[in-house]
Amino acid sequence: MHRRAFVQGLAWLAAAGPARAQGFAGLGGEAEGYPPVVRGRALTFPADHGAHPQFRIEWWYVTANLRGEDGEAYGVQWTLFRQAMAPGSEGQGWGSRQLWMGHAAVTSARQHLFAERLARGGVGQAGVEAAPFHAFIDAWELRAPEGASAQTLAPLALKASSTDFRIDLRLDTTRPVVLQGEGGYSEKSTRGQASYYYSQPFFTAQGEIALAGRSVGVTGQAWLDREWSSQPLAPDQKGWDWMSLHLASGDKVMLFRLRQDDGADYRSGNWIDADGTAHALAASDIAMTPTAWTTIGTHVVPTSWRVAIASRGLTISIAPLNPQSWMGTSIPYWEGPVRIEGSHGGVGYLEATGY
């Protein structure tokens, strides 16, 4: 690893490290001095597409389920994280209190290739502009052209590359973004932890990917998640299981469960009709049960699931395209494309952290 990236990686881990025991990646650590997430705060665009440096943690997260011209299934992940090292003013130049981290991955049934980028804020290495939208870290970027719609956040060009893979996609939609939770207020526990959260689950994707020196044209569906918070987890929440599902009917489903040290969990979700109408799902309506586990080194991760939503008549099984989709990054986790069978068919993405 380049010396600069190594030093920045230590800084990122130092920012999260002291609270590592307080929720996954320190996200349950005390957030004194940072602004709280409050119910009723209206999200506005394009402003909220940009960064919120006064909050402690934030991310721009894209996953794509793709089909290649070769007939094979592929998955793509592109993520930009921002973390404030301390509350207060953002700071300028090398005095910036902002750290940035990027993750990208290309997944097939036989390969899972990933890379990480680390950068310091304030010096042009990474950042996000709200309009025209541009999120970047080094040469990786998610960019909208002049005149792009603030309500749809489209079209977008997505680019990332590493020594053994490359991603070059165009994302587009005519549907507006979807507010998760209560108008963008997404509760994460019964004790007040929450985030601001919205998604764009209706992207179509087309372009080209390359892995291990082989290029292939691809088309498919993509999902963008946007969240920011100062304390998104409770101190005893050790990780989460999150799913974004593209059903064959055109409907979309977002589900998550946050696992607690005492064995209990906090569940939440959203059913999004094909026309974009969102319906919050009660915890009692959501059943998420692991059915198979994958061992990756010292980590044992649930990679196959049975999911039921009684009110919607949904009973499905979820299986990974590649069970070895481990992101061996500074803060490691499992992330990969999945296929859906049962009462509904489709594809999606699974993220499993804290294992």
Image: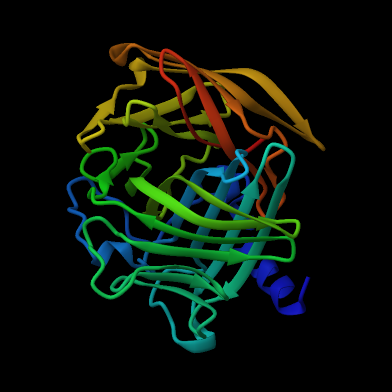
User: In the rendering, at what x and y percent does residue 282 appear?
Assistant: 30, 22
Compared with 237, 164 (above or below) is below
Residue at the far right in the pictured view: 297
Percent x, y for residue 29?
Answer: 51, 50
Quadrant of image for the N terminus: bottom right
The residue closer to the viewer here, 15 or 325, is 325
The extreme bottom residue here reads 93
Answer above or below: position of 236 versus 24. Answer: above
What residue do we see at 62% from left, 69% from top?
118
Which residue does the image show at 65% across and 52% down from the upper left?
331
Q: Position of residue 61 (x, y in %)?
A: 46, 53
The number of discs equals: 0
User: Residue 299 vs residue 191: left or right?
Assistant: right
Inspect this view and state whether residue 14 appears. Answer: no
Q: Residue at x 37, y 35 (%)?
A: 191
* Quarter containing the C terminus: top right
| Residue beneath the point at 43% across and 32% down | 245
Q: Is residue 225 left or right of residue 166?
A: left
Above-or-below relation of 343 to 328: above
Q: Nearer the viewer, residue 88 or 11?
A: 11
Looking at the image, can residue 60 be seen? yes
